[in-house]
Image (cartoon, coloured by chain):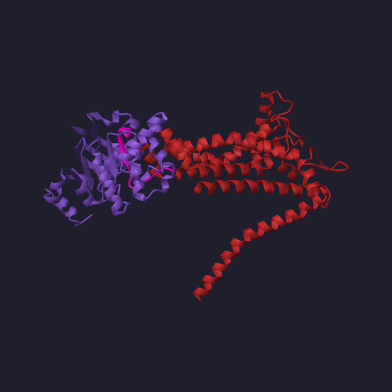
Chain colours: A purple, B red
Amino acid sequence: MVKFDIKDLNIWFGPVHALKQVSMEIQANEILSVIGPSNSGKTTFLRMLNRLNDLNQNFRMSGVVKLERKDIKNIDTELLRKRVGMVFALPLPLPLSVFDNVAYGVRMHGRKTKKILQDRVEESLKEAYLWEEVKDRLNESAFKLSGGQQQRLCIARTLAVEPEVILFDEPCSGLDPISTAKVEDAMVKLKQKYTIVLVTNNVKQAARVGDRTAFFLGGELIELDKTDKIFTAPQDKRTDGYIRGKFG
Amino acid sequence: MRKLKELIIEKLILICGLASIFFVALIFLFLLKEGLTLFKTVSPFKFLFGKSWYPISEPAQLGILPLILGSLLVTIGAAIISIPIGVGCAIYIAEIAPLKIKETLKAGIELLAAIPSVVLGFIGMVTLVPLVKTVFHLPTGLTALSGSIMLAFMAMPTIVSIAEDALYSVPKTYKEGALALGATHWQTIWRVMLPAASSGILAAVMLGIGRVIGETMAVMMITGNAAVIPNSILAPVRTLTATIAAEMGEAVVGSEHYFALFAIGIVLFVISFAINVTADLFLHKRQQ
Protein backbone atom coordinates (compact mmCIF):
# COMPACT_ATOMS: atom_id res chain seq x y z
CA MET A 1 0.00 0.00 0.00
CA VAL A 2 1.24 3.48 -0.81
CA LYS A 3 1.41 5.70 2.25
CA PHE A 4 2.81 8.90 0.81
CA ASP A 5 2.52 9.84 -2.83
CA ILE A 6 4.70 12.81 -3.77
CA LYS A 7 4.47 14.42 -7.22
CA ASP A 8 6.60 17.21 -8.68
CA LEU A 9 7.39 18.68 -5.30
CA ASN A 10 9.29 21.97 -5.37
CA ILE A 11 10.11 23.96 -2.27
CA TRP A 12 11.56 27.42 -1.95
CA PHE A 13 12.68 29.35 1.11
CA GLY A 14 12.75 32.91 -0.15
CA PRO A 15 15.09 32.83 -3.16
CA VAL A 16 16.58 29.42 -2.29
CA HIS A 17 15.24 26.52 -4.30
CA ALA A 18 15.54 23.82 -1.63
CA LEU A 19 13.79 20.89 -3.33
CA LYS A 20 13.56 20.41 -7.07
CA GLN A 21 10.93 18.31 -8.85
CA VAL A 22 10.88 15.49 -6.34
CA SER A 23 8.49 12.61 -7.07
CA MET A 24 8.34 9.40 -5.12
CA GLU A 25 6.14 6.97 -3.27
CA ILE A 26 6.61 5.81 0.28
CA GLN A 27 5.22 2.37 1.00
CA ALA A 28 3.38 1.48 4.17
CA ASN A 29 5.42 -0.46 6.73
CA GLU A 30 8.75 0.20 5.14
CA ILE A 31 11.78 2.00 6.45
CA LEU A 32 12.81 4.56 3.88
CA SER A 33 16.27 5.95 4.57
CA VAL A 34 17.06 9.36 3.18
CA ILE A 35 20.75 10.14 2.79
CA GLY A 36 22.73 12.99 1.29
CA PRO A 37 25.23 15.65 2.30
CA SER A 38 24.16 18.73 4.24
CA ASN A 39 22.09 21.22 2.26
CA SER A 40 20.88 18.41 0.03
CA GLY A 41 17.26 19.03 1.01
CA LYS A 42 16.70 15.82 2.94
CA THR A 43 15.51 17.49 6.13
CA THR A 44 13.34 19.87 4.12
CA PHE A 45 11.82 16.83 2.47
CA LEU A 46 11.15 15.20 5.83
CA ARG A 47 9.62 18.33 7.33
CA MET A 48 7.34 18.57 4.29
CA LEU A 49 5.64 15.35 5.29
CA ASN A 50 4.22 16.80 8.53
CA ARG A 51 4.15 20.37 7.26
CA LEU A 52 6.66 21.71 9.75
CA ASN A 53 8.12 23.76 6.90
CA ASP A 54 4.99 25.90 7.09
CA LEU A 55 6.45 27.54 10.20
CA ASN A 56 9.01 29.31 8.05
CA GLN A 57 7.52 32.55 6.77
CA ASN A 58 9.44 32.41 3.48
CA PHE A 59 8.24 28.90 2.63
CA ARG A 60 6.66 28.36 -0.80
CA MET A 61 5.90 25.11 -2.57
CA SER A 62 4.44 23.60 -5.70
CA GLY A 63 3.43 20.04 -6.44
CA VAL A 64 1.34 17.61 -4.43
CA VAL A 65 1.97 15.49 -1.37
CA LYS A 66 -0.73 12.92 -0.68
CA LEU A 67 -1.16 10.87 2.46
CA GLU A 68 -3.28 7.83 1.60
CA ARG A 69 -4.57 9.51 -1.54
CA LYS A 70 -5.55 12.71 0.22
CA ASP A 71 -3.65 15.97 -0.36
CA ILE A 72 -2.03 16.90 2.97
CA LYS A 73 -3.02 20.51 2.40
CA ASN A 74 -6.59 19.39 2.90
CA ILE A 75 -5.87 17.55 6.13
CA ASP A 76 -6.17 19.52 9.33
CA THR A 77 -2.58 20.35 10.38
CA GLU A 78 -2.94 19.06 13.94
CA LEU A 79 -4.49 15.83 12.72
CA LEU A 80 -1.77 15.40 10.10
CA ARG A 81 0.92 15.84 12.73
CA LYS A 82 -0.81 13.37 14.98
CA ARG A 83 -0.85 10.83 12.16
CA VAL A 84 2.68 11.66 11.08
CA GLY A 85 4.86 11.83 14.19
CA MET A 86 8.39 13.10 14.32
CA VAL A 87 11.52 12.34 16.36
CA PHE A 88 14.15 15.08 16.32
CA ALA A 89 17.92 15.00 16.16
CA LEU A 90 18.48 16.00 19.76
CA PRO A 91 16.47 14.22 22.42
CA LEU A 92 14.15 16.84 23.74
CA PRO A 93 12.46 15.65 26.90
CA LEU A 94 10.21 18.15 28.60
CA PRO A 95 11.06 19.15 32.17
CA LEU A 96 8.55 16.60 33.50
CA SER A 97 8.63 13.07 34.84
CA VAL A 98 9.19 10.11 32.54
CA PHE A 99 5.51 9.22 32.76
CA ASP A 100 4.28 12.74 32.05
CA ASN A 101 6.59 13.07 29.09
CA VAL A 102 4.97 10.11 27.39
CA ALA A 103 1.47 11.05 28.52
CA TYR A 104 1.97 14.61 27.32
CA GLY A 105 0.79 14.25 23.76
CA VAL A 106 -2.04 11.92 24.74
CA ARG A 107 -3.39 14.44 27.21
CA MET A 108 -3.15 17.15 24.60
CA HIS A 109 -5.44 15.24 22.29
CA GLY A 110 -8.25 15.10 24.80
CA ARG A 111 -8.69 14.01 28.38
CA LYS A 112 -8.27 10.32 29.06
CA THR A 113 -8.96 8.28 32.17
CA LYS A 114 -6.02 7.36 34.35
CA LYS A 115 -6.25 3.72 33.33
CA ILE A 116 -6.13 4.44 29.61
CA LEU A 117 -3.26 6.82 30.15
CA GLN A 118 -1.27 4.28 32.15
CA ASP A 119 -1.85 1.56 29.58
CA ARG A 120 -0.88 3.83 26.72
CA VAL A 121 2.30 4.95 28.46
CA GLU A 122 3.34 1.39 29.26
CA GLU A 123 2.59 0.18 25.75
CA SER A 124 4.50 3.05 24.13
CA LEU A 125 7.51 2.58 26.38
CA LYS A 126 7.54 -1.12 25.54
CA GLU A 127 7.37 -0.38 21.83
CA ALA A 128 10.30 2.00 22.19
CA TYR A 129 12.25 -0.67 24.10
CA LEU A 130 12.55 1.50 27.14
CA TRP A 131 10.01 -0.04 29.51
CA GLU A 132 12.37 -2.48 31.22
CA GLU A 133 14.86 0.28 31.94
CA VAL A 134 12.45 2.84 33.33
CA LYS A 135 9.48 0.94 34.72
CA ASP A 136 10.63 1.60 38.29
CA ARG A 137 11.47 5.23 37.75
CA LEU A 138 8.42 6.55 35.95
CA ASN A 139 8.12 9.41 38.40
CA GLU A 140 11.71 10.55 38.11
CA SER A 141 12.63 13.55 36.02
CA ALA A 142 13.23 12.69 32.38
CA PHE A 143 16.52 14.57 32.54
CA LYS A 144 17.96 11.85 34.74
CA LEU A 145 17.85 9.37 31.87
CA SER A 146 20.90 8.86 29.65
CA GLY A 147 21.01 10.39 26.18
CA GLY A 148 20.00 7.17 24.47
CA GLN A 149 17.18 6.61 26.94
CA GLN A 150 15.99 10.17 26.42
CA GLN A 151 15.86 9.63 22.68
CA ARG A 152 13.85 6.43 23.13
CA LEU A 153 11.62 8.36 25.53
CA CYS A 154 10.98 10.84 22.74
CA ILE A 155 10.15 7.94 20.44
CA ALA A 156 7.72 6.61 23.05
CA ARG A 157 6.18 10.08 23.33
CA THR A 158 5.62 10.12 19.59
CA LEU A 159 4.19 6.57 19.62
CA ALA A 160 1.79 7.43 22.42
CA VAL A 161 -0.35 9.62 20.20
CA GLU A 162 -0.78 6.61 17.86
CA PRO A 163 0.69 7.84 14.60
CA GLU A 164 0.79 5.94 11.32
CA VAL A 165 4.07 7.33 10.09
CA ILE A 166 7.14 8.26 12.11
CA LEU A 167 9.70 10.67 10.76
CA PHE A 168 13.18 10.39 12.21
CA ASP A 169 15.42 13.41 11.73
CA GLU A 170 18.96 12.15 12.35
CA PRO A 171 17.81 10.48 15.56
CA CYS A 172 21.23 9.13 16.52
CA SER A 173 23.44 12.08 15.72
CA GLY A 174 24.04 12.80 19.38
CA LEU A 175 24.25 9.23 20.63
CA ASP A 176 27.03 6.75 21.34
CA PRO A 177 27.23 3.50 19.30
CA ILE A 178 25.48 1.35 21.91
CA SER A 179 22.56 3.73 22.32
CA THR A 180 22.44 4.03 18.54
CA ALA A 181 22.15 0.28 18.21
CA LYS A 182 19.24 0.26 20.66
CA VAL A 183 17.41 3.01 18.78
CA GLU A 184 17.99 1.15 15.51
CA ASP A 185 16.63 -2.08 17.02
CA ALA A 186 13.54 -0.20 18.08
CA MET A 187 13.11 1.24 14.59
CA VAL A 188 13.35 -2.13 12.85
CA LYS A 189 10.71 -3.61 15.11
CA LEU A 190 8.47 -0.57 14.79
CA LYS A 191 8.08 -0.96 11.05
CA GLN A 192 5.66 -3.85 11.50
CA LYS A 193 3.17 -1.32 12.76
CA TYR A 194 4.36 1.98 11.38
CA THR A 195 5.81 3.50 8.26
CA ILE A 196 9.21 5.00 8.95
CA VAL A 197 11.13 7.70 7.14
CA LEU A 198 14.67 8.06 8.44
CA VAL A 199 16.88 10.98 7.54
CA THR A 200 20.44 10.22 8.47
CA ASN A 201 23.95 11.52 7.96
CA ASN A 202 25.26 8.10 8.81
CA VAL A 203 25.41 6.14 5.56
CA LYS A 204 26.05 2.90 7.39
CA GLN A 205 22.93 3.39 9.45
CA ALA A 206 20.90 3.71 6.26
CA ALA A 207 22.45 0.46 5.06
CA ARG A 208 21.66 -1.29 8.34
CA VAL A 209 18.02 -0.40 8.83
CA GLY A 210 16.57 0.87 5.53
CA ASP A 211 14.39 -1.23 3.24
CA ARG A 212 14.82 1.36 0.55
CA THR A 213 17.20 4.28 0.40
CA ALA A 214 16.80 7.66 -1.29
CA PHE A 215 19.83 9.76 -2.15
CA PHE A 216 19.40 13.54 -2.29
CA LEU A 217 21.92 15.99 -3.67
CA GLY A 218 21.49 19.72 -4.11
CA GLY A 219 17.73 19.52 -3.65
CA GLU A 220 17.26 16.79 -6.22
CA LEU A 221 16.32 13.17 -5.69
CA ILE A 222 19.18 11.43 -7.46
CA GLU A 223 18.31 7.84 -6.84
CA LEU A 224 15.78 5.74 -4.96
CA ASP A 225 16.01 2.00 -4.81
CA LYS A 226 16.23 -1.06 -2.58
CA THR A 227 18.91 -0.48 0.02
CA ASP A 228 20.95 -3.48 -1.13
CA LYS A 229 20.97 -2.18 -4.64
CA ILE A 230 21.93 1.37 -3.69
CA PHE A 231 24.84 0.10 -1.69
CA THR A 232 26.06 -2.58 -4.07
CA ALA A 233 25.15 -1.41 -7.55
CA PRO A 234 24.06 2.23 -7.61
CA GLN A 235 22.92 3.51 -10.99
CA ASP A 236 24.26 7.01 -10.58
CA LYS A 237 27.93 7.89 -10.26
CA ARG A 238 27.18 10.53 -7.66
CA THR A 239 25.39 8.03 -5.41
CA ASP A 240 28.37 5.74 -5.68
CA GLY A 241 30.73 8.59 -4.78
CA TYR A 242 28.72 9.60 -1.76
CA ILE A 243 28.31 6.18 -0.19
CA ARG A 244 31.98 5.48 -0.72
CA GLY A 245 32.72 8.65 1.20
CA LYS A 246 34.29 10.51 -1.70
CA PHE A 247 32.36 13.68 -0.86
CA GLY A 248 29.73 14.94 1.57
CA MET B 1 55.06 47.96 27.35
CA ARG B 2 52.07 46.06 26.03
CA LYS B 3 51.73 44.32 29.34
CA LEU B 4 51.68 47.63 31.16
CA LYS B 5 48.95 48.88 28.84
CA GLU B 6 46.92 45.75 29.52
CA LEU B 7 47.40 46.23 33.22
CA ILE B 8 46.28 49.85 33.16
CA ILE B 9 43.19 49.06 31.11
CA GLU B 10 42.35 46.13 33.34
CA LYS B 11 42.59 48.26 36.47
CA LEU B 12 40.52 51.05 34.90
CA ILE B 13 37.77 48.60 34.07
CA LEU B 14 37.99 47.20 37.57
CA ILE B 15 37.52 50.69 38.99
CA CYS B 16 34.47 51.23 36.78
CA GLY B 17 33.06 47.97 38.03
CA LEU B 18 33.70 48.75 41.66
CA ALA B 19 32.42 52.31 41.33
CA SER B 20 28.80 51.25 41.05
CA ILE B 21 29.04 49.10 44.16
CA PHE B 22 30.87 51.88 45.97
CA PHE B 23 28.18 54.45 45.18
CA VAL B 24 25.38 52.10 46.18
CA ALA B 25 27.12 51.47 49.46
CA LEU B 26 27.60 55.19 50.07
CA ILE B 27 23.98 55.96 49.31
CA PHE B 28 22.80 53.16 51.51
CA LEU B 29 25.04 54.25 54.40
CA PHE B 30 23.84 57.83 54.16
CA LEU B 31 20.24 56.67 54.05
CA LEU B 32 20.78 54.48 57.09
CA LYS B 33 22.59 57.18 59.05
CA GLU B 34 19.90 59.78 58.50
CA GLY B 35 16.95 57.40 58.68
CA LEU B 36 17.96 55.49 61.77
CA THR B 37 18.39 58.72 63.75
CA LEU B 38 14.60 58.89 63.84
CA PHE B 39 14.38 55.76 65.94
CA LYS B 40 16.11 57.53 68.84
CA THR B 41 12.86 59.36 69.46
CA VAL B 42 10.20 57.26 67.73
CA SER B 43 9.91 53.50 68.12
CA PRO B 44 10.19 51.52 64.85
CA PHE B 45 6.90 49.79 65.63
CA LYS B 46 5.06 53.08 66.04
CA PHE B 47 6.66 54.36 62.87
CA LEU B 48 5.68 51.38 60.72
CA PHE B 49 2.23 50.73 62.17
CA GLY B 50 1.18 54.15 63.37
CA LYS B 51 -2.11 55.06 61.79
CA SER B 52 -1.62 58.78 61.39
CA TRP B 53 0.90 60.82 59.50
CA TYR B 54 0.85 64.41 60.83
CA PRO B 55 4.49 65.42 60.58
CA ILE B 56 4.09 69.07 61.45
CA SER B 57 1.52 68.92 64.19
CA GLU B 58 2.72 69.39 67.76
CA PRO B 59 3.74 66.77 68.81
CA ALA B 60 4.39 65.27 65.37
CA GLN B 61 2.71 61.94 64.59
CA LEU B 62 4.89 59.89 62.33
CA GLY B 63 3.01 56.66 61.49
CA ILE B 64 3.49 55.54 57.92
CA LEU B 65 0.90 52.74 57.78
CA PRO B 66 -1.41 54.85 55.58
CA LEU B 67 1.47 55.51 53.20
CA ILE B 68 2.49 51.84 53.04
CA LEU B 69 -1.12 50.83 52.38
CA GLY B 70 -1.39 53.55 49.75
CA SER B 71 1.68 52.29 47.93
CA LEU B 72 0.50 48.71 48.23
CA LEU B 73 -2.98 49.45 46.95
CA VAL B 74 -1.73 51.39 43.93
CA THR B 75 0.88 48.75 43.15
CA ILE B 76 -1.47 45.79 43.42
CA GLY B 77 -4.02 47.57 41.27
CA ALA B 78 -1.41 48.37 38.65
CA ALA B 79 -0.13 44.79 38.70
CA ILE B 80 -3.61 43.35 38.24
CA ILE B 81 -4.13 45.57 35.23
CA SER B 82 -0.72 45.44 33.62
CA ILE B 83 0.37 41.80 34.04
CA PRO B 84 -2.38 40.08 32.02
CA ILE B 85 -2.37 42.76 29.33
CA GLY B 86 1.42 42.91 29.21
CA VAL B 87 1.96 39.16 29.03
CA GLY B 88 -0.88 38.79 26.52
CA CYS B 89 0.68 41.49 24.39
CA ALA B 90 4.07 39.79 24.60
CA ILE B 91 2.55 36.47 23.49
CA TYR B 92 0.83 38.19 20.58
CA ILE B 93 4.01 39.93 19.47
CA ALA B 94 6.30 36.94 19.90
CA GLU B 95 4.06 34.22 18.54
CA ILE B 96 1.02 35.35 16.65
CA ALA B 97 1.42 38.75 15.02
CA PRO B 98 2.45 38.91 11.35
CA LEU B 99 5.76 40.67 10.78
CA LYS B 100 4.31 44.06 9.90
CA ILE B 101 1.99 44.32 12.89
CA LYS B 102 4.80 43.05 15.08
CA GLU B 103 7.11 45.89 14.06
CA THR B 104 4.38 48.49 14.52
CA LEU B 105 3.46 47.18 17.96
CA LYS B 106 7.05 47.06 19.12
CA ALA B 107 7.62 50.63 18.00
CA GLY B 108 4.43 51.67 19.77
CA ILE B 109 5.50 50.06 23.01
CA GLU B 110 8.91 51.68 22.86
CA LEU B 111 7.17 54.98 22.36
CA LEU B 112 5.01 54.33 25.41
CA ALA B 113 8.17 53.70 27.42
CA ALA B 114 9.62 56.97 26.19
CA ILE B 115 6.80 59.16 27.56
CA PRO B 116 8.10 61.00 30.64
CA SER B 117 6.14 60.07 33.72
CA VAL B 118 5.22 63.66 34.47
CA VAL B 119 3.55 63.88 31.06
CA LEU B 120 1.64 60.68 31.71
CA GLY B 121 0.62 62.08 35.09
CA PHE B 122 -0.58 65.28 33.58
CA ILE B 123 -2.51 63.53 30.82
CA GLY B 124 -4.04 61.27 33.45
CA MET B 125 -5.03 64.28 35.48
CA VAL B 126 -7.03 65.91 32.71
CA THR B 127 -8.50 62.77 31.11
CA LEU B 128 -8.53 59.78 33.43
CA VAL B 129 -9.33 61.57 36.68
CA PRO B 130 -12.60 63.18 35.47
CA LEU B 131 -13.55 59.87 33.84
CA VAL B 132 -13.08 57.92 37.08
CA LYS B 133 -15.02 60.61 38.90
CA THR B 134 -18.08 60.41 36.64
CA VAL B 135 -18.05 56.64 36.15
CA PHE B 136 -18.02 55.87 39.86
CA HIS B 137 -19.94 58.98 40.99
CA LEU B 138 -17.16 60.09 43.32
CA PRO B 139 -16.58 63.47 44.90
CA THR B 140 -13.07 63.38 43.40
CA GLY B 141 -11.40 61.32 40.71
CA LEU B 142 -8.01 61.57 42.38
CA THR B 143 -8.02 58.00 43.66
CA ALA B 144 -5.84 54.92 44.02
CA LEU B 145 -7.62 53.45 41.01
CA SER B 146 -6.56 56.35 38.78
CA GLY B 147 -3.00 55.89 39.99
CA SER B 148 -3.16 52.15 39.32
CA ILE B 149 -4.37 52.62 35.77
CA MET B 150 -1.75 55.23 35.00
CA LEU B 151 1.04 53.17 36.54
CA ALA B 152 -0.13 50.12 34.62
CA PHE B 153 0.69 52.07 31.47
CA MET B 154 4.17 52.67 32.79
CA ALA B 155 4.80 49.06 33.81
CA MET B 156 3.48 47.67 30.53
CA PRO B 157 6.45 48.50 28.26
CA THR B 158 8.85 46.85 30.71
CA ILE B 159 6.70 43.75 31.04
CA VAL B 160 6.00 43.45 27.33
CA SER B 161 9.54 43.86 26.09
CA ILE B 162 11.19 41.56 28.62
CA ALA B 163 8.47 38.91 28.43
CA GLU B 164 8.63 39.03 24.64
CA ASP B 165 12.39 38.53 24.81
CA ALA B 166 11.89 35.55 27.10
CA LEU B 167 9.36 33.97 24.75
CA TYR B 168 11.53 34.67 21.75
CA SER B 169 14.52 32.96 23.31
CA VAL B 170 12.66 29.70 23.96
CA PRO B 171 14.49 27.23 21.69
CA LYS B 172 12.70 26.67 18.39
CA THR B 173 13.01 22.93 18.94
CA TYR B 174 10.59 23.09 21.91
CA LYS B 175 7.95 24.64 19.76
CA GLU B 176 8.52 22.24 16.87
CA GLY B 177 8.51 19.30 19.25
CA ALA B 178 5.09 20.25 20.56
CA LEU B 179 3.68 21.00 17.12
CA ALA B 180 5.05 17.71 15.78
CA LEU B 181 2.99 15.89 18.42
CA GLY B 182 -0.08 17.47 16.91
CA ALA B 183 -0.54 20.27 19.43
CA THR B 184 -2.49 23.29 18.29
CA HIS B 185 -0.81 26.67 18.27
CA TRP B 186 -2.50 27.69 21.50
CA GLN B 187 -1.66 24.38 23.24
CA THR B 188 1.94 24.92 22.21
CA ILE B 189 1.97 28.44 23.62
CA TRP B 190 0.17 27.54 26.82
CA ARG B 191 1.83 24.25 27.68
CA VAL B 192 5.30 24.62 26.23
CA MET B 193 6.25 28.22 25.43
CA LEU B 194 4.92 29.85 28.59
CA PRO B 195 6.35 27.30 31.04
CA ALA B 196 9.69 27.38 29.22
CA ALA B 197 9.76 31.17 29.37
CA SER B 198 8.29 31.41 32.86
CA SER B 199 11.46 32.57 34.58
CA GLY B 200 11.91 35.40 32.09
CA ILE B 201 8.25 36.35 32.33
CA LEU B 202 8.48 36.41 36.10
CA ALA B 203 11.49 38.68 35.87
CA ALA B 204 9.51 40.91 33.53
CA VAL B 205 6.65 41.11 36.01
CA MET B 206 9.00 41.84 38.91
CA LEU B 207 10.76 44.61 37.04
CA GLY B 208 7.39 46.05 36.07
CA ILE B 209 6.28 46.04 39.69
CA GLY B 210 9.59 47.53 40.72
CA ARG B 211 8.99 50.38 38.35
CA VAL B 212 5.51 50.93 39.78
CA ILE B 213 6.66 51.02 43.41
CA GLY B 214 9.42 53.48 42.67
CA GLU B 215 7.31 55.76 40.51
CA THR B 216 6.76 59.15 42.07
CA MET B 217 5.69 61.95 39.80
CA ALA B 218 2.60 60.49 38.20
CA VAL B 219 1.19 59.03 41.41
CA MET B 220 1.75 62.29 43.20
CA MET B 221 -0.29 64.08 40.56
CA ILE B 222 -3.29 61.78 40.41
CA THR B 223 -3.77 59.81 43.60
CA GLY B 224 -5.09 62.70 45.65
CA ASN B 225 -2.30 62.77 48.23
CA ALA B 226 -4.40 62.08 51.28
CA ALA B 227 -2.31 60.40 53.94
CA VAL B 228 -5.17 58.45 55.47
CA ILE B 229 -5.77 54.73 55.57
CA PRO B 230 -7.74 54.03 52.38
CA ASN B 231 -10.96 52.05 52.75
CA SER B 232 -11.29 51.21 49.08
CA ILE B 233 -9.45 51.52 45.79
CA LEU B 234 -11.76 54.43 44.99
CA ALA B 235 -10.39 56.53 47.86
CA PRO B 236 -7.55 59.03 47.56
CA VAL B 237 -4.23 57.72 48.83
CA ARG B 238 -0.68 58.89 49.25
CA THR B 239 2.25 56.67 48.45
CA LEU B 240 5.63 56.42 50.15
CA THR B 241 7.41 57.96 47.20
CA ALA B 242 5.01 60.85 46.83
CA THR B 243 5.38 61.68 50.51
CA ILE B 244 9.12 62.05 50.24
CA ALA B 245 8.90 64.08 47.06
CA ALA B 246 6.22 66.40 48.39
CA GLU B 247 7.60 67.01 51.85
CA MET B 248 11.37 66.89 51.55
CA GLY B 249 11.52 70.48 50.35
CA GLU B 250 9.73 71.87 53.37
CA ALA B 251 11.10 69.63 56.11
CA VAL B 252 13.53 71.40 58.41
CA VAL B 253 16.95 69.78 58.09
CA GLY B 254 17.72 67.85 61.27
CA SER B 255 14.11 67.75 62.46
CA GLU B 256 12.18 64.60 63.30
CA HIS B 257 10.17 65.08 60.12
CA TYR B 258 13.36 65.20 58.06
CA PHE B 259 14.66 61.97 59.57
CA ALA B 260 11.28 60.33 59.13
CA LEU B 261 11.41 60.99 55.39
CA PHE B 262 14.79 59.27 55.27
CA ALA B 263 13.35 56.37 57.22
CA ILE B 264 10.64 56.11 54.55
CA GLY B 265 13.47 55.90 52.06
CA ILE B 266 14.83 52.91 53.97
CA VAL B 267 11.42 51.24 53.88
CA LEU B 268 11.23 51.76 50.11
CA PHE B 269 14.74 50.40 49.74
CA VAL B 270 13.83 47.31 51.73
CA ILE B 271 10.68 46.75 49.67
CA SER B 272 12.48 46.94 46.31
CA PHE B 273 15.27 44.81 47.66
CA ALA B 274 12.74 42.20 48.79
CA ILE B 275 11.11 42.18 45.35
CA ASN B 276 14.45 41.65 43.63
CA VAL B 277 15.45 38.88 46.01
CA THR B 278 12.13 37.07 45.54
CA ALA B 279 12.50 37.29 41.78
CA ASP B 280 16.05 35.97 42.07
CA LEU B 281 15.01 33.09 44.29
CA PHE B 282 12.30 32.18 41.84
CA LEU B 283 14.68 32.32 38.90
CA HIS B 284 17.21 30.05 40.57
CA LYS B 285 14.54 27.63 41.64
CA ARG B 286 13.40 27.29 38.04
CA GLN B 287 16.93 26.72 36.82
CA GLN B 288 17.39 23.80 39.17
Is residue A88 shown in magenta? yes
Horizontal side of B170 relative to B209 (left or right) equals left
Q: Which residue is nearer to you in this view: B207 or A175?
A: A175
Report x, y in % for residue B287. 50, 48
**Where does the image place residue B152, in percent across and percent down from the top left?**
61, 36
Residue at x 59% of width, y 61% of height: B17
Answer left or right for B123 relative to B251: left
Q: Residue at x 32, y 52 (%)?
A: A175
**Residue A112 lies in what quarter of the image?**
top left
**Magenta span covers which residues?**
A81-95
Q: In this view of the protein, can residue B97 be seen by the observer?
A: no
Q: Position of residue B169 (x, y in %)?
A: 45, 46
Is residue B242 in sight in this rendering?
A: yes
- Camera-side residue of A39 and B112: A39
Residue at the limit of the structure toward the bottom, as seen here: B1
On whether residue B244 falls in the magenta region, the answer is no
The quadrant in which residue A213 appears is top left
Name the side, left or right, on which B34 lies relative to A92. Answer: right
Is B210 placed above or below A83 here? Answer: below
Q: How many marks?
A: 0
Point 72% across, 25% down: residue: B138
Seen in the picture, residue A48 relative to B39 is either above or below; the reply is above
- Which residue: 46% across, 35% down? B190
